């Protein structure tokens, strides 16, 4: 293969053009349902754990330490169980900063009398009373503004992928839905406590540690709104 053709293939592969070309005339294909622990980027989570304490058995006692009811709890507790994640984020920020500084300085120095030596120099050549004079003025002004408003509301089911030694659950939720030629992708991963799971088997995103929430997609509209890969490359390479 010629170097030019090889470079073209590498560029098309790296920017995802081959995938986009394969979807010409039809909507984007969905990802097949699969085990999230088999994903290339998935890895087990290791976190600080308390010391393991054994629960003593009590004679003639029906209650088991750590249980929340006599009957079986229907909420997620083991690997493979499903839990619904509720993401309700309404974040806004508005910051305004203004700075103004002014400074003016004037300095002057002279030697009108110095043991009569000032008479040796004619005043037309050098005036001893005005040997040094300086002035300075500085002005600085700065303004800054940050205005942000974000609102995301999601509700999707995830699966427990890991139970940590202290009982916390690692969950992974992923959902895709397609409308015409647009594919929307939702992903949520994190660590939750069994105590934070509500009675309807739901958990809020603000009760999730190490939360990673992604909401995006791909399709014809996203292609139009995104800069071309050549423009993105030039923005990265050009220093000015």
Image (cartoon, helix red, strand yellow):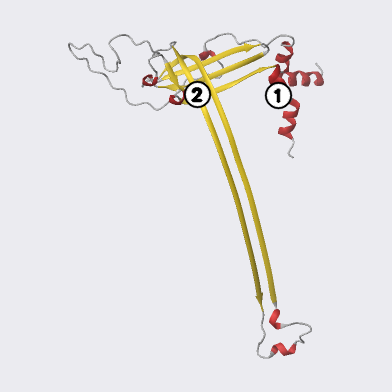
Query: How dense is the environment of label 1, judged by Cα within 10 Å: few (below 14), some, or many (20 and up)?
Result: few
Q: Distance from label 1 to label 2 (Cα)?
A: 26 Å
Q: Quadrant of residue 204?
A: top left
Callout 2 secondary element: strand
Determine the residue positioned at 69% across, 70% down: 134
Quadrant of the frame with the N terminus: top right
Q: Are marks 1 and 2 in contact (CB under 8 Å)?
A: no
**Residue placed farthest to the left in the image?**
60
| Label disc, if present, on residue 155 of the rendered structure | none
Instruction: Decide if residue 136 is on the left or right side of residue 85.
Output: right
The correct choice, above or below, for 98 with respect to 49 in the image is below
Determine the residue positioned at 29% across, 13% down: 69
Q: Which residue is mark 2?
A: 88
Q: Which residue is mark 1?
A: 225
Query: How dense is the environment of label 2, judged by Cα within 10 Å: few (below 14), some, or many (20 and up)?
Result: some
Label 1 vs label 2, nearer the camera: 2
- Where residue 67 appears, x then y in whole percent? 29, 15
Between disc 1 and disc 2, whose residue precedes?
A: 2
Determine the residue positioned at 67% across, 63% down: 137
- Where residue 190 appears, x then y in whole percent? 47, 22
Q: Quadrant of residue 193?
A: top left
* Tally of numbered tags: 2
Quadrant of the frame with the C terminus: top right
- Where residue 145 appears, x then y in whole percent? 61, 42
- Where residue 147 appears, x then y in whole percent? 59, 37
The correct choice, above or below, for 190 with respect to 108 in the image is above
Q: Quadrant of residue 198?
A: top left
Callout 1 secondary element: helix
User: Is 177 or 189 nearer to us in this picture?
Assistant: 177
């Amino acid at each position: 293969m010629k170097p030019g053709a090889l470079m073209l293939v590498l560029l098309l592969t790296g920017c995802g053009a081959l995938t986009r070309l394969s979807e010409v005339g039809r909507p984007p294909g969905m990802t097949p349902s699969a085990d999230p622990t088999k994903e290339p980027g998935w890895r087990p989570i290791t976190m600080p754990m308390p010391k393991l304490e054994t629960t003593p058995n009590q004679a003639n006692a029906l209650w088991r330490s750590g249980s929340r009811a006599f009957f079986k709890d229907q909420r997620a507790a083991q690997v493979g169980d499903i839990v619904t994640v509720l993401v309700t984020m309404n974040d806004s920020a508005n910051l305004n900063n203004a700075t103004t500084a002014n400074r003016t300085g004037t300095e002057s120095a002279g030697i009108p009398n110095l043991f009569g030596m000032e008479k040796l120099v004619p005043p037309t050549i050098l005036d001893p009373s005005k040997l040094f004079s300086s002035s300075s003025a500085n002005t600085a002004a700065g303004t800054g503004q940050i205005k942000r408003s974000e609102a995301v509301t999601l509700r999707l089911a995830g699966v427990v992928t890991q139970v940590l030694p202290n009982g916390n659950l690692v969950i992974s939720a992923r959902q895709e839905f397609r409308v015409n030629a647009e594919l929307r992708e939702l992903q949520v991963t994190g660590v939750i406590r069994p105590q934070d799971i509500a009675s309807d088997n739901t958990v809020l995103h603000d009760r999730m540690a190490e939360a990673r929430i992604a909401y995006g997609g791909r399709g014809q509209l996203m292609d139009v709104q995104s800069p071309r890969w050549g423009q993105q490359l030039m923005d990265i390479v050009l220093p000015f």
